[in-house]
Image (cartoon, rainbow, N blue to C red):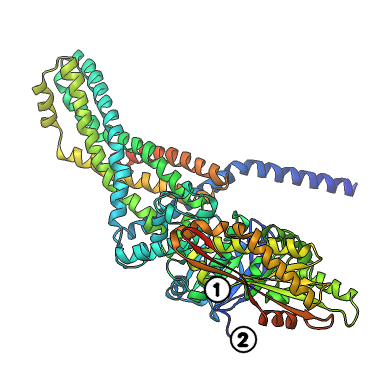
């Protein structure tokens, strides 16, 4: 009897243990994910901080100018294209919504404020992420897996100074300028649809913009762009720089996945931080 | 002996529970060429990356000039690393920069030299590595061999005191392999740096190495001179060295030094007291001047063709040969006395001049068109030995009796004998 009772007790104990493990499994996996993300956040913050410290070292100017060309100048066309159609569709939608209340004179205000406060910074950041951010991750990732970054270290050239710092600096400079371009071209797009196609008075359109857009709207929009620039450039550079340390893949596949991660994480963080910054500024 | 430049004490390194290096102990001395040999995947590159600080050991101590690296201040480590240069196995050239920009990068980023001085230094290295035609090309537009030479030029551009070469000859044809090894040896002698090589090119690397380290089953199983390695009795030799030596014939058609020694002993054992044999020594004269004017490739091609012809000529009468130095081939004529050997050598010299001259010079002609006249001379000497005489003394005697058997003046219009 005694051995049977013992084995029954043991099996009951084991069963309880298994149930406990099963119940705790979701929590432990959440815990692991949180710890991993906190680790990544910490290392990305240090990564950004170290890169920013090296901005003002010697021989950085030409590299920053070169990156301004790649990230900024070469993104201008796509930004203009997107912004003109965004402005046009805003003009079109707002005209048809406001005309019901006889308030079509406010089309200019609606277009301008939507662009300056929200759409300009967010869409510009997403467009730069898609065009330049992915290229940054892929380029740095390839440099990493082909030992070019190690080669820099052996030549006593700091990779953070040589590769990362100019890109983050160029992004911080480019984003506000490109957002401003986006806003201006977007307002022209609104003018095309509202005034030229739907017959709104052009004086009314521009006057409503001038009368209702305040300096705070513009500065808030620009603050957002700088936050987005820091996020996008850090995420994209970080993903490329540590592409070789991915646990899910190696080599070219790791670079591909790092590029995808960089774009997805950047876009999500743009939208999340947009809400946080807006709630703080409003 | 002096304090080692670099010393490993019980270095252990693992990656994902796989131990690559286990209690590795080694010593590397200043001003020498030290070669690390071992099978692929044995951890040679990992070992090299420990030296330059790209990888940190899990256990153990690395000493630099007798001082533990882990106890050094950041400034001291930077000063030590500033003396080093590293040539990567995969070259690690920056693919968005041209060959010129790749080579100039270390000078542009780490020195305050003026543009004209940087330009002068870079162009000098480009000429030495025969990359003049590739200055404006990107790495992806170059062949594997040219990429290797660009990486070599970049590694040497800062005149480092310690240069680490991670398989510098991988992907090269047999002639280029020896050309690169020759280039490393020449620069090492000229600039006096400490060279640490990882290589599979056995026994070719022996010609340029002062010391050899053998990495086998995660540990250093041998460190010593190439001559000491010949006497070393360990499973490593069967698994690594002998299998790699089998490839030696690819280059010159000659036996490796070890095979040559075995053959020689076998021949001598069969001989009775009083029997004689002869040794012939062939030397390509003034090799450094030829390298300067014609380049490493041309010299290696000349030696290769010389080796093939020596083997063809003397092999037919039972002779066997090996390459003794970069520019020297020795041949044993096991059944000949001195009179007979002299007649055979005269025939050889005659045939050599008559038949193989075009072949011998084919490799160098293209360069001569650019360089101007240069004299190529081959010396040969013969000595007679007895079965119980030391082979080295017979070789020395043959060297002392060398005389000119072939000379050619290379000039713009072709070859003058």
Residue B171 appears at what percent x and percent y? Answer: 60, 53
Q: Mark 1: few, some, or many residues within 10 Å (few <14, many ≥20)?
A: few
Seen at 77% across and 73% down, the residue is B341
Seen at 42% across and 58% down, the residue is A159
Of residue B92 and residue A137, the one placed in the foreground of this image is B92
Which quadrant is home to the C terminus of chain B?
bottom right
Determine which of the numbered discs, if any, sits on residue B286 in the image: 1
Seen at 53% across and 46% down, the residue is A33
Q: Are marks 2 and 1 in contact (CB under 8 Å)?
A: no
Residue B323 appears at what percent x and percent y? Answer: 68, 69
Residue A271 appears at what percent x and percent y? Answer: 36, 37
Label 1 resides on the chain identified as B
Looking at the image, the residue that sits furthest to the top is A100
Q: Mark 2: few, some, or many residues within 10 Å (few <14, many ≥20)?
A: few
Label 2 resides on the chain identified as B
Of residue B309 and residue A239, the one placed in the foreground of this image is B309
**Picture quarter containing residue B60?**
bottom right
Determine which of the numbered discs, if any, sits on residue B1 in the image: 2
**Picture quarter containing residue B113?**
bottom left
Seen at 26% across and 47% down, the residue is A173
């Amino acid at each position: 009897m005694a051995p049977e009772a013992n084995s029954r007790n043991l099996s009951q104990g084991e069963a309880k243990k298994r149930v406990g493990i099963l119940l705790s499994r979701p929590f432990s996996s959440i815990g692991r994910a949180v710890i991993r993300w906190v680790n990544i956040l910490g290392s990305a913050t240090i990564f950004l901080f170290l890169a920013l410290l090296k901005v003002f070292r010697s021989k950085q100017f030409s590299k920053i100018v070169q990156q301004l060309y790649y990230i900024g100048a070469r993104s201008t066309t796509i930004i203009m294209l997107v912004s003109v159609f965004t402005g046009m569709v805003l003009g079109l939608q707002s005209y048809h919504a406001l005309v019901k209340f006889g308030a079509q004179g406010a089309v200019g205000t609606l277009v301008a404020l939507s662009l300056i406060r929200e759409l300009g910074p967010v869409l510009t950041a997403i467009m730069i992420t898609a065009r330049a951010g992915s290229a940054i991750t892929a380029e740095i990732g390839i440099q990493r897996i082909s030992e070019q970054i190690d080669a820099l270290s052996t030549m006593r050239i700091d990779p953070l100074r040589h590769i990362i710092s100019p890109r983050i600096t160029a992004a911080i400079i480019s984003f506000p300028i490109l957002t401003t371009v986006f806003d201006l071209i977007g307002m022209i797009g609104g003018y095309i649809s509202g005034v030229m196609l739907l017959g709104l008075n052009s004086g009314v359109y521009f006057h409503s913009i001038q009368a209702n857009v305040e300096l705070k709207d513009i500065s808030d929009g620009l603050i957002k762009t700088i936050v987005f620039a820091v996020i996008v450039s850090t995420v994209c550079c970080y993903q490329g720089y540590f592409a070789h340390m991915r646990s899910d893949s190696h080599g070219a596949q790791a670079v591909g996945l790092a590029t995808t991660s960089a774009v997805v994480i950047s876009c999500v963080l743009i939208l999340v931080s947009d809400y946080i910054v807006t709630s703080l500024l409003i | 002996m002096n304090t080692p430049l670099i010393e490993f004490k019980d270095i252990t390194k693992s990656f994902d529970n796989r131990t690559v290096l286990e209690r590795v102990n080694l010593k590397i001395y200043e001003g020498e060429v030290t070669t690390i040999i071992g099978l692929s995947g044995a951890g040679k590159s990992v070992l090299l990356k420990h030296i330059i600080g790209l990888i940190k050991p899990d256990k153990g101590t690395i000493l630099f000039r007798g001082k533990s690296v882990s106890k050094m201040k950041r400034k001291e480590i930077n000063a030590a690393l500033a003396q080093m240069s590293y040539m990567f196995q995969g070259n690690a050239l920056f693919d968005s920069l041209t060959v010129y920009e790749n080579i100039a990068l270390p000078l542009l980023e780490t020195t305050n030299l003026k543009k004209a001085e940087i330009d002068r230094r870079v162009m000098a290295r480009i000429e030495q590595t025969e990359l003049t035609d590739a200055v404006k090309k990107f790495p992806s537009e170059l062949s594997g061999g040219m990429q290797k030479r660009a990486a070599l030029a970049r590694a040497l551009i800062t005149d480092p005191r310690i240069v680490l070469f991670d398989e510098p000859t991988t992907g090269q044809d047999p002639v280029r392999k020896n050309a690169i090894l020759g280039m490393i040896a020449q620069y090492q002698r000229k600039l006096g740096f400490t060279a640490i090589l990882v290589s599979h090119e056995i026994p070719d690397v022996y010609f340029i190495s002062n010391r050899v380290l053998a990495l086998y089953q995660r540990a250093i199983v041998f460190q010593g001179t190439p001559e000491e390695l010949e006497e070393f009795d360990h499973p490593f030799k069967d698994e690594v060295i002998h299998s790699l030596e089998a490839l030696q014939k690819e280059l010159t058609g000659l036996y490796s030094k070890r095979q040559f020694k075995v053959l020689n002993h076998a021949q001598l054992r069969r001989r009775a007291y009083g029997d004689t044999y002869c040794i012939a020594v062939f030397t390509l004269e003034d090799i450094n001047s030829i390298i300067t004017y014609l380049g490493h490739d041309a010299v290696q091609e000349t030696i290769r063709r010389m080796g093939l012809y020596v083997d063809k000529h003397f092999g037919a009468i039972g002779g066997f040969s090996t390459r003794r130095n970069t520019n020297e081939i020795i041949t044993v004529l096991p059944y000949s006395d001195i009179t007979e050997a002299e007649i055979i050598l005269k025939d050889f010299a005659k045939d050599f001049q008559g038949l193989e001259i075009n072949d011998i010079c084919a490799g160098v002609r293209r360069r001569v068109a650019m360089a101007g006249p240069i004299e190529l001379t081959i010396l040969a000497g013969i000595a007679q030995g007895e079965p119980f005489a030391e082979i080295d003394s017979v070789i020395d005697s043959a060297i002392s009796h060398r005389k000119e058997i072939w000379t050619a003046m290379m000039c713009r219009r072709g070859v003058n004998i």
